[in-house]
Amino acid sequence: MSKEKIEANREKILNGPIVPTLLMLAYPIIINQLVHVLYNLTDTFWLGKLGRIELSAPGTAWPLVWFLMSIGSGFVVAGFAFVSQYVGAGDYEKANRYAGALYSLLLIFATGVSVFGIALAPYFLRFMKVSETIFPYALMYTRIIFAGIPFSFTLFAFNFLLRAIGDTKTPVKINIGTIILNIILDPFLIFGWGPFPELGVAGAAIATMLSNSVGSLIGGYLLFTGKVGIHLTLENLRPDLKLYSRIFRVGLPSSIGDSTSALGFVILTRIIFTVGRIYGEAHGIKGYEDVAFPTYSITNRLTNFMFAFSDGISMAMGTMVGQNLGARKYERAKEIAEKTMLINFTILSIGTLTFAIFRVPIFKFFVNDPMVIAESKKVVMYFSASLPFFGIFSAVNNVFNSAGHTKKSMILGIIRLWILRIPLSYWLGVVMKDTAGMWLGMGLSNVIGALIGLAWFLRGSWLKGVIEEHH
Protein backbone atom coordinates (compact mmCIF):
# COMPACT_ATOMS: atom_id res chain seq x y z
CA MET A 1 0.00 0.00 0.00
CA SER A 2 1.55 3.32 -1.11
CA LYS A 3 1.92 6.37 1.14
CA GLU A 4 -0.74 8.16 -0.99
CA LYS A 5 -3.16 5.29 -0.43
CA ILE A 6 -2.48 5.35 3.32
CA GLU A 7 -3.11 9.12 3.32
CA ALA A 8 -6.37 8.67 1.35
CA ASN A 9 -7.52 6.00 3.82
CA ARG A 10 -6.50 8.20 6.75
CA GLU A 11 -8.59 11.05 5.31
CA LYS A 12 -11.67 8.78 5.08
CA ILE A 13 -11.07 7.38 8.58
CA LEU A 14 -10.71 10.85 10.13
CA ASN A 15 -13.31 12.80 8.11
CA GLY A 16 -15.41 10.45 5.92
CA PRO A 17 -18.94 9.13 6.60
CA ILE A 18 -18.69 6.68 9.51
CA VAL A 19 -20.77 3.64 8.49
CA PRO A 20 -19.59 3.43 4.83
CA THR A 21 -15.94 3.83 5.94
CA LEU A 22 -16.44 1.23 8.67
CA LEU A 23 -17.92 -1.25 6.17
CA MET A 24 -15.18 -0.47 3.61
CA LEU A 25 -12.54 -1.42 6.21
CA ALA A 26 -14.59 -4.28 7.67
CA TYR A 27 -15.59 -6.32 4.63
CA PRO A 28 -12.08 -7.68 3.89
CA ILE A 29 -11.63 -8.57 7.59
CA ILE A 30 -15.06 -10.27 7.64
CA ILE A 31 -14.08 -12.31 4.56
CA ASN A 32 -10.81 -13.15 6.32
CA GLN A 33 -12.62 -14.23 9.51
CA LEU A 34 -15.15 -16.26 7.51
CA VAL A 35 -12.38 -18.04 5.64
CA HIS A 36 -10.73 -18.86 8.99
CA VAL A 37 -14.00 -20.26 10.26
CA LEU A 38 -14.44 -22.17 7.01
CA TYR A 39 -11.08 -23.82 7.64
CA ASN A 40 -12.16 -24.80 11.19
CA LEU A 41 -15.48 -26.08 9.87
CA THR A 42 -13.68 -28.10 7.19
CA ASP A 43 -11.45 -29.70 9.83
CA THR A 44 -14.53 -30.50 11.91
CA PHE A 45 -16.41 -31.84 8.86
CA TRP A 46 -13.64 -34.22 7.68
CA LEU A 47 -12.73 -35.41 11.19
CA GLY A 48 -16.45 -35.91 11.88
CA LYS A 49 -16.39 -38.53 9.12
CA LEU A 50 -13.95 -40.52 11.32
CA GLY A 51 -16.26 -40.12 14.37
CA ARG A 52 -17.07 -37.90 17.35
CA ILE A 53 -13.84 -38.88 19.20
CA GLU A 54 -11.56 -37.76 16.34
CA LEU A 55 -13.71 -34.65 15.80
CA SER A 56 -12.86 -33.61 19.39
CA ALA A 57 -9.05 -33.54 18.93
CA PRO A 58 -8.72 -29.96 17.57
CA GLY A 59 -11.26 -28.71 20.13
CA THR A 60 -9.15 -29.98 23.03
CA ALA A 61 -5.88 -28.76 21.48
CA TRP A 62 -6.91 -25.19 20.66
CA PRO A 63 -7.52 -23.80 24.20
CA LEU A 64 -4.02 -24.99 25.06
CA VAL A 65 -2.37 -23.59 21.91
CA TRP A 66 -4.35 -20.36 22.35
CA PHE A 67 -3.21 -20.09 25.98
CA LEU A 68 0.49 -20.10 25.07
CA MET A 69 0.02 -17.94 21.95
CA SER A 70 -2.07 -15.39 23.84
CA ILE A 71 0.83 -14.53 26.13
CA GLY A 72 2.42 -12.94 23.03
CA SER A 73 -0.78 -11.55 21.53
CA GLY A 74 -0.67 -8.56 23.89
CA PHE A 75 2.55 -7.43 22.21
CA VAL A 76 0.73 -7.57 18.86
CA VAL A 77 -2.12 -5.43 20.27
CA ALA A 78 0.42 -2.91 21.62
CA GLY A 79 2.28 -2.83 18.29
CA PHE A 80 -1.06 -2.19 16.55
CA ALA A 81 -1.89 0.70 18.93
CA PHE A 82 1.51 2.37 18.34
CA VAL A 83 1.60 1.85 14.56
CA SER A 84 -2.04 2.98 13.95
CA GLN A 85 -1.66 6.05 16.19
CA TYR A 86 1.68 7.11 14.63
CA VAL A 87 0.05 6.76 11.18
CA GLY A 88 -2.85 8.89 12.49
CA ALA A 89 -0.30 11.48 13.68
CA GLY A 90 1.52 11.33 10.29
CA ASP A 91 4.84 9.99 11.69
CA TYR A 92 5.62 7.11 9.29
CA GLU A 93 9.25 6.63 10.34
CA LYS A 94 8.24 5.81 13.92
CA ALA A 95 5.44 3.56 12.63
CA ASN A 96 8.08 1.51 10.71
CA ARG A 97 10.40 1.34 13.72
CA TYR A 98 7.66 -0.04 15.96
CA ALA A 99 6.63 -2.52 13.26
CA GLY A 100 10.21 -3.88 13.09
CA ALA A 101 10.52 -4.12 16.87
CA LEU A 102 7.23 -6.03 17.08
CA TYR A 103 8.26 -8.52 14.39
CA SER A 104 11.64 -9.39 15.94
CA LEU A 105 10.17 -9.59 19.46
CA LEU A 106 7.55 -12.08 18.28
CA LEU A 107 10.06 -14.30 16.49
CA ILE A 108 12.11 -14.70 19.68
CA PHE A 109 9.00 -15.32 21.78
CA ALA A 110 7.35 -17.81 19.39
CA THR A 111 10.41 -20.06 19.25
CA GLY A 112 10.30 -20.40 23.05
CA VAL A 113 6.55 -21.13 23.03
CA SER A 114 7.02 -23.86 20.41
CA VAL A 115 9.63 -25.78 22.45
CA PHE A 116 7.69 -25.34 25.72
CA GLY A 117 4.38 -26.47 24.18
CA ILE A 118 5.75 -29.66 22.60
CA ALA A 119 7.37 -30.69 25.91
CA LEU A 120 4.44 -29.95 28.24
CA ALA A 121 1.41 -30.87 26.07
CA PRO A 122 0.63 -34.22 27.84
CA TYR A 123 0.61 -32.58 31.29
CA PHE A 124 -1.76 -29.84 30.11
CA LEU A 125 -4.15 -32.36 28.53
CA ARG A 126 -4.22 -34.44 31.74
CA PHE A 127 -5.02 -31.27 33.68
CA MET A 128 -7.94 -30.62 31.28
CA LYS A 129 -9.36 -34.06 32.23
CA VAL A 130 -9.45 -35.08 28.55
CA SER A 131 -11.04 -38.54 28.41
CA GLU A 132 -8.79 -41.56 27.75
CA THR A 133 -10.46 -42.14 24.37
CA ILE A 134 -9.75 -38.61 23.09
CA PHE A 135 -6.29 -38.17 24.76
CA PRO A 136 -3.96 -39.84 22.16
CA TYR A 137 -5.56 -37.95 19.26
CA ALA A 138 -5.45 -34.63 21.15
CA LEU A 139 -1.77 -35.08 22.10
CA MET A 140 -0.67 -35.83 18.55
CA TYR A 141 -2.64 -32.89 17.13
CA THR A 142 -1.36 -30.46 19.79
CA ARG A 143 2.33 -31.30 19.33
CA ILE A 144 2.20 -30.86 15.54
CA ILE A 145 0.46 -27.47 15.89
CA PHE A 146 3.08 -26.29 18.42
CA ALA A 147 5.87 -27.18 15.97
CA GLY A 148 4.44 -24.56 13.56
CA ILE A 149 3.88 -21.77 16.12
CA PRO A 150 6.69 -19.42 14.89
CA PHE A 151 4.99 -19.31 11.47
CA SER A 152 1.54 -18.73 13.01
CA PHE A 153 2.89 -15.84 15.08
CA THR A 154 4.65 -14.00 12.25
CA LEU A 155 1.52 -14.35 10.08
CA PHE A 156 -0.50 -12.94 13.01
CA ALA A 157 1.90 -9.94 13.27
CA PHE A 158 1.66 -9.32 9.49
CA ASN A 159 -2.17 -9.17 9.68
CA PHE A 160 -2.13 -6.69 12.57
CA LEU A 161 0.55 -4.42 11.07
CA LEU A 162 -1.31 -4.05 7.80
CA ARG A 163 -4.62 -3.43 9.58
CA ALA A 164 -2.92 -0.66 11.58
CA ILE A 165 -2.14 1.30 8.38
CA GLY A 166 -5.69 0.75 7.08
CA ASP A 167 -4.81 -2.03 4.58
CA THR A 168 -7.34 -4.72 5.40
CA LYS A 169 -7.28 -6.31 1.92
CA THR A 170 -3.74 -7.68 1.52
CA PRO A 171 -3.83 -9.91 4.66
CA VAL A 172 -7.17 -11.31 3.48
CA LYS A 173 -5.78 -12.35 0.11
CA ILE A 174 -2.89 -14.20 1.81
CA ASN A 175 -5.12 -15.78 4.47
CA ILE A 176 -7.61 -16.95 1.87
CA GLY A 177 -4.74 -18.54 -0.08
CA THR A 178 -3.37 -20.35 2.99
CA ILE A 179 -6.80 -21.57 4.06
CA ILE A 180 -7.74 -22.82 0.58
CA LEU A 181 -4.44 -24.72 0.65
CA ASN A 182 -5.41 -26.15 4.05
CA ILE A 183 -8.89 -27.14 2.86
CA ILE A 184 -7.38 -28.92 -0.17
CA LEU A 185 -4.70 -30.71 1.90
CA ASP A 186 -7.12 -31.84 4.66
CA PRO A 187 -8.87 -34.82 2.99
CA PHE A 188 -5.67 -35.91 1.17
CA LEU A 189 -3.70 -36.11 4.42
CA ILE A 190 -6.55 -37.35 6.67
CA PHE A 191 -7.78 -40.17 4.40
CA GLY A 192 -4.62 -40.82 2.36
CA TRP A 193 -6.06 -39.88 -1.03
CA GLY A 194 -3.81 -40.36 -4.06
CA PRO A 195 -0.09 -40.65 -3.25
CA PHE A 196 -0.50 -39.34 0.31
CA PRO A 197 -0.30 -41.54 3.44
CA GLU A 198 -3.45 -41.96 5.57
CA LEU A 199 -2.62 -39.86 8.65
CA GLY A 200 -6.06 -39.32 10.26
CA VAL A 201 -6.05 -36.65 12.99
CA ALA A 202 -2.30 -35.96 12.47
CA GLY A 203 -3.06 -35.19 8.80
CA ALA A 204 -5.42 -32.36 9.81
CA ALA A 205 -2.70 -30.85 12.04
CA ILE A 206 0.02 -31.15 9.37
CA ALA A 207 -2.26 -29.47 6.79
CA THR A 208 -2.75 -26.54 9.21
CA MET A 209 0.96 -26.20 9.96
CA LEU A 210 2.06 -26.32 6.30
CA SER A 211 -0.56 -23.76 5.21
CA ASN A 212 0.38 -21.28 7.97
CA SER A 213 4.04 -21.60 7.02
CA VAL A 214 3.32 -20.68 3.40
CA GLY A 215 1.24 -17.64 4.49
CA SER A 216 3.92 -16.49 6.91
CA LEU A 217 6.68 -16.66 4.27
CA ILE A 218 4.62 -14.64 1.75
CA GLY A 219 3.79 -12.02 4.44
CA GLY A 220 7.46 -11.77 5.41
CA TYR A 221 8.48 -11.32 1.77
CA LEU A 222 5.99 -8.43 1.31
CA LEU A 223 7.14 -6.67 4.51
CA PHE A 224 10.86 -6.97 3.69
CA THR A 225 10.47 -5.81 0.08
CA GLY A 226 8.41 -2.80 1.26
CA LYS A 227 5.55 -3.59 -1.12
CA VAL A 228 2.81 -3.05 1.49
CA GLY A 229 3.36 0.41 3.01
CA ILE A 230 5.34 -0.93 5.96
CA HIS A 231 8.98 -1.65 5.16
CA LEU A 232 10.91 -3.92 7.49
CA THR A 233 14.70 -3.80 7.23
CA LEU A 234 17.42 -5.63 9.14
CA GLU A 235 18.10 -2.26 10.79
CA ASN A 236 14.62 -1.85 12.31
CA LEU A 237 14.48 -5.58 13.18
CA ARG A 238 17.58 -5.30 15.39
CA PRO A 239 16.56 -5.86 19.02
CA ASP A 240 15.81 -2.43 20.55
CA LEU A 241 15.30 -2.71 24.29
CA LYS A 242 13.73 0.75 24.56
CA LEU A 243 11.01 -0.06 22.01
CA TYR A 244 10.61 -3.58 23.42
CA SER A 245 9.98 -2.14 26.87
CA ARG A 246 7.35 0.28 25.51
CA ILE A 247 5.59 -2.49 23.58
CA PHE A 248 5.91 -4.67 26.67
CA ARG A 249 4.49 -2.00 29.00
CA VAL A 250 1.44 -1.27 26.82
CA GLY A 251 1.02 -4.91 25.80
CA LEU A 252 1.45 -6.61 29.18
CA PRO A 253 -2.12 -6.00 30.46
CA SER A 254 -3.48 -7.28 27.13
CA SER A 255 -1.21 -10.36 27.36
CA ILE A 256 -2.40 -11.01 30.90
CA GLY A 257 -6.01 -10.47 29.79
CA ASP A 258 -5.71 -12.73 26.74
CA SER A 259 -3.77 -15.48 28.50
CA THR A 260 -6.07 -15.54 31.54
CA SER A 261 -8.94 -15.64 29.06
CA ALA A 262 -7.33 -18.55 27.19
CA LEU A 263 -6.50 -20.31 30.47
CA GLY A 264 -10.19 -19.89 31.31
CA PHE A 265 -11.04 -21.91 28.20
CA VAL A 266 -8.56 -24.60 29.30
CA ILE A 267 -10.48 -24.74 32.61
CA LEU A 268 -13.80 -24.62 30.73
CA THR A 269 -12.71 -27.72 28.76
CA ARG A 270 -12.06 -29.45 32.08
CA ILE A 271 -15.54 -28.37 33.31
CA ILE A 272 -17.24 -29.73 30.16
CA PHE A 273 -15.57 -33.15 30.57
CA THR A 274 -16.39 -33.15 34.31
CA VAL A 275 -20.06 -32.07 34.01
CA GLY A 276 -20.52 -34.48 31.08
CA ARG A 277 -19.23 -37.31 33.27
CA ILE A 278 -21.48 -36.26 36.23
CA TYR A 279 -24.56 -36.08 33.97
CA GLY A 280 -23.72 -39.48 32.46
CA GLU A 281 -23.35 -41.10 35.89
CA ALA A 282 -26.63 -39.53 37.12
CA HIS A 283 -28.49 -40.91 34.09
CA GLY A 284 -26.65 -44.23 33.69
CA ILE A 285 -24.99 -43.23 30.39
CA LYS A 286 -21.34 -44.32 30.31
CA GLY A 287 -18.88 -41.94 28.63
CA TYR A 288 -21.31 -39.01 28.25
CA GLU A 289 -18.31 -36.62 28.38
CA ASP A 290 -17.55 -37.90 24.85
CA VAL A 291 -20.97 -36.50 23.83
CA ALA A 292 -20.83 -33.19 25.76
CA PHE A 293 -17.44 -32.15 24.38
CA PRO A 294 -18.10 -32.80 20.64
CA THR A 295 -21.39 -30.84 21.05
CA TYR A 296 -19.39 -27.96 22.52
CA SER A 297 -16.80 -28.25 19.70
CA ILE A 298 -19.43 -27.96 16.97
CA THR A 299 -21.25 -25.14 18.83
CA ASN A 300 -17.97 -23.27 19.09
CA ARG A 301 -17.38 -23.54 15.35
CA LEU A 302 -20.91 -22.29 14.61
CA THR A 303 -20.73 -19.33 16.99
CA ASN A 304 -17.33 -18.44 15.48
CA PHE A 305 -19.07 -18.29 12.10
CA MET A 306 -21.46 -15.65 13.47
CA PHE A 307 -18.68 -13.81 15.30
CA ALA A 308 -16.77 -13.53 12.00
CA PHE A 309 -19.14 -10.67 11.11
CA SER A 310 -19.19 -8.90 14.46
CA ASP A 311 -15.44 -9.35 15.06
CA GLY A 312 -14.64 -8.03 11.57
CA ILE A 313 -16.68 -4.90 12.22
CA SER A 314 -15.15 -4.52 15.70
CA MET A 315 -11.61 -4.78 14.27
CA ALA A 316 -12.33 -2.22 11.54
CA MET A 317 -13.74 0.04 14.25
CA GLY A 318 -10.41 -0.47 16.11
CA THR A 319 -8.45 1.03 13.18
CA MET A 320 -10.86 4.00 13.04
CA VAL A 321 -10.84 4.58 16.80
CA GLY A 322 -7.02 4.30 16.96
CA GLN A 323 -6.45 6.83 14.18
CA ASN A 324 -9.14 9.25 15.42
CA LEU A 325 -7.63 9.23 18.91
CA GLY A 326 -4.18 9.85 17.33
CA ALA A 327 -5.72 12.89 15.58
CA ARG A 328 -7.50 13.91 18.86
CA LYS A 329 -10.99 13.58 17.36
CA TYR A 330 -12.57 12.18 20.53
CA GLU A 331 -16.29 12.73 19.82
CA ARG A 332 -15.95 11.03 16.45
CA ALA A 333 -14.14 8.06 18.06
CA LYS A 334 -17.05 7.65 20.51
CA GLU A 335 -19.68 7.86 17.75
CA ILE A 336 -17.82 5.22 15.67
CA ALA A 337 -17.85 2.83 18.65
CA GLU A 338 -21.56 3.33 19.43
CA LYS A 339 -22.62 2.68 15.82
CA THR A 340 -20.48 -0.48 15.77
CA MET A 341 -22.23 -1.88 18.86
CA LEU A 342 -25.66 -1.39 17.31
CA ILE A 343 -24.60 -3.07 14.04
CA ASN A 344 -23.08 -6.02 15.95
CA PHE A 345 -26.16 -6.57 18.11
CA THR A 346 -28.40 -6.65 15.02
CA ILE A 347 -26.17 -9.06 13.04
CA LEU A 348 -25.87 -11.54 15.93
CA SER A 349 -29.61 -11.44 16.65
CA ILE A 350 -30.31 -12.55 13.06
CA GLY A 351 -27.59 -15.24 13.30
CA THR A 352 -28.94 -16.61 16.59
CA LEU A 353 -32.47 -16.92 15.19
CA THR A 354 -31.16 -18.83 12.14
CA PHE A 355 -29.11 -21.14 14.40
CA ALA A 356 -32.18 -21.94 16.53
CA ILE A 357 -34.42 -22.69 13.52
CA PHE A 358 -31.94 -24.93 11.63
CA ARG A 359 -30.22 -26.58 14.61
CA VAL A 360 -30.86 -30.25 13.68
CA PRO A 361 -29.70 -30.18 10.02
CA ILE A 362 -26.69 -28.04 10.99
CA PHE A 363 -25.46 -30.52 13.64
CA LYS A 364 -26.26 -33.52 11.41
CA PHE A 365 -24.04 -32.04 8.71
CA PHE A 366 -21.01 -32.44 11.00
CA VAL A 367 -21.73 -35.66 12.84
CA ASN A 368 -24.84 -37.79 12.48
CA ASP A 369 -24.90 -38.82 16.13
CA PRO A 370 -28.34 -38.85 17.86
CA MET A 371 -26.83 -38.14 21.31
CA VAL A 372 -24.91 -35.08 20.08
CA ILE A 373 -28.04 -33.79 18.28
CA ALA A 374 -30.13 -34.27 21.46
CA GLU A 375 -27.51 -32.37 23.51
CA SER A 376 -27.57 -29.51 20.96
CA LYS A 377 -31.19 -28.76 21.94
CA LYS A 378 -29.90 -27.60 25.34
CA VAL A 379 -27.41 -25.30 23.58
CA VAL A 380 -30.25 -23.48 21.82
CA MET A 381 -32.43 -23.33 24.93
CA TYR A 382 -29.84 -22.12 27.43
CA PHE A 383 -26.96 -20.48 25.57
CA SER A 384 -27.69 -19.08 22.11
CA ALA A 385 -29.85 -16.10 23.21
CA SER A 386 -26.73 -14.58 24.82
CA LEU A 387 -24.79 -14.27 21.54
CA PRO A 388 -26.03 -10.76 20.48
CA PHE A 389 -24.71 -9.46 23.82
CA PHE A 390 -21.30 -10.86 22.98
CA GLY A 391 -21.29 -8.48 19.96
CA ILE A 392 -21.45 -5.52 22.36
CA PHE A 393 -18.77 -7.06 24.59
CA SER A 394 -16.44 -7.61 21.60
CA ALA A 395 -16.86 -3.99 20.42
CA VAL A 396 -16.13 -2.52 23.87
CA ASN A 397 -13.05 -4.74 24.18
CA ASN A 398 -11.73 -3.55 20.82
CA VAL A 399 -12.34 0.11 21.73
CA PHE A 400 -10.24 -0.24 24.89
CA ASN A 401 -7.43 -2.10 23.08
CA SER A 402 -7.27 0.33 20.14
CA ALA A 403 -7.11 3.26 22.54
CA GLY A 404 -4.15 1.50 24.18
CA HIS A 405 -6.18 1.16 27.42
CA THR A 406 -5.31 -2.51 27.59
CA LYS A 407 -5.82 -2.75 31.37
CA LYS A 408 -9.53 -2.05 30.91
CA SER A 409 -9.99 -4.84 28.34
CA MET A 410 -7.93 -7.16 30.56
CA ILE A 411 -10.21 -6.52 33.55
CA LEU A 412 -13.33 -6.87 31.38
CA GLY A 413 -12.14 -10.23 29.99
CA ILE A 414 -11.33 -11.51 33.49
CA ILE A 415 -14.79 -10.51 34.78
CA ARG A 416 -16.62 -12.28 31.93
CA LEU A 417 -14.62 -15.49 32.13
CA TRP A 418 -13.27 -15.95 35.64
CA ILE A 419 -15.87 -14.17 37.78
CA LEU A 420 -18.91 -15.13 35.69
CA ARG A 421 -18.48 -17.97 33.14
CA ILE A 422 -16.28 -20.49 34.97
CA PRO A 423 -18.00 -20.38 38.41
CA LEU A 424 -21.52 -20.24 36.89
CA SER A 425 -20.93 -23.06 34.36
CA TYR A 426 -19.34 -25.31 36.97
CA TRP A 427 -21.72 -24.52 39.81
CA LEU A 428 -24.96 -24.72 37.78
CA GLY A 429 -23.73 -27.86 35.94
CA VAL A 430 -22.79 -29.67 39.15
CA VAL A 431 -25.80 -28.50 41.22
CA MET A 432 -28.29 -29.43 38.48
CA LYS A 433 -26.23 -32.56 37.58
CA ASP A 434 -27.04 -31.53 34.04
CA THR A 435 -25.14 -30.10 31.08
CA ALA A 436 -28.07 -27.63 30.71
CA GLY A 437 -26.74 -25.80 33.80
CA MET A 438 -23.32 -25.53 32.19
CA TRP A 439 -24.79 -23.99 29.00
CA LEU A 440 -26.88 -21.58 31.08
CA GLY A 441 -23.75 -20.44 32.96
CA MET A 442 -22.00 -19.72 29.66
CA GLY A 443 -24.98 -17.70 28.41
CA LEU A 444 -25.29 -15.60 31.58
CA SER A 445 -21.59 -14.67 31.41
CA ASN A 446 -22.10 -13.10 27.95
CA VAL A 447 -25.13 -11.04 28.99
CA ILE A 448 -23.76 -9.73 32.31
CA GLY A 449 -20.25 -9.16 30.83
CA ALA A 450 -21.71 -7.05 27.98
CA LEU A 451 -23.76 -4.89 30.37
CA ILE A 452 -20.71 -4.20 32.58
CA GLY A 453 -18.59 -3.37 29.49
CA LEU A 454 -21.22 -1.00 28.11
CA ALA A 455 -21.51 0.87 31.43
CA TRP A 456 -17.70 1.28 31.56
CA PHE A 457 -17.50 2.45 27.94
CA LEU A 458 -20.15 5.12 28.56
CA ARG A 459 -18.04 6.63 31.36
CA GLY A 460 -15.58 7.71 28.59
CA SER A 461 -12.33 7.21 30.54
CA TRP A 462 -10.76 5.55 27.46
CA LEU A 463 -10.83 8.78 25.38
CA LYS A 464 -7.06 9.40 25.39
CA GLY A 465 -4.50 7.67 23.14
CA VAL A 466 -1.21 6.01 24.18
CA ILE A 467 1.10 8.09 22.00
CA GLU A 468 0.27 11.20 24.05
CA GLU A 469 2.11 9.57 26.96
CA HIS A 470 5.19 8.77 24.87
CA HIS A 471 5.96 12.06 23.09
Image (cartoon, rainbow, N blue to C red):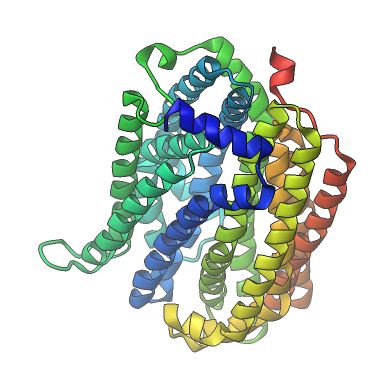
- Tally of marks: 0
Residue 438 or residue 377, whichever sits in front: 377
| Side (left or right) of 1 relative to 82 | left
User: Percent from the top left, x then y, of residue 419?
Assistant: 79, 52
Residue 183 visible in the picture: yes
User: Percent from the top left, x then y, of residue 19?
Assistant: 66, 52
Quarter of the rendering occupied by the N terminus: top left
User: Percent from the top left, x then y, of residue 167?
Assistant: 48, 39
Residue 67 or residue 129, whichever sits in front: 67
Residue 465 or residue 277, whichever sits in front: 465
- Image height of 346 relative to 168, above or below: below
For the point 61% across and 73% down, which residue is it?
Answer: 276
Residue 285 visible in the picture: no
For the point 52% across and 54% down, which residue is it?
Answer: 27
For the point 31% across and 62% down, which residue is it?
Answer: 183
User: Percent from the top left, x then y, of residue 201?
Assistant: 33, 62
Quarter of the rendering occupied by the C terminus: top right
- Image height of 441 relative to 214, above or below: below
Residue 193 or residue 228, whichever sits in front: 228
Q: To which quarter of the image does residue 238 belong? A: top left
- Image height of 352 relative to 85, above or below: below
| Side (left or right) of 224 relative to 469 | left
| Side (left or right) of 124 relative to 53 | right
Q: Residue furthest left?
A: 195
Q: To which quarter of the image does residue 376 belong? A: bottom right
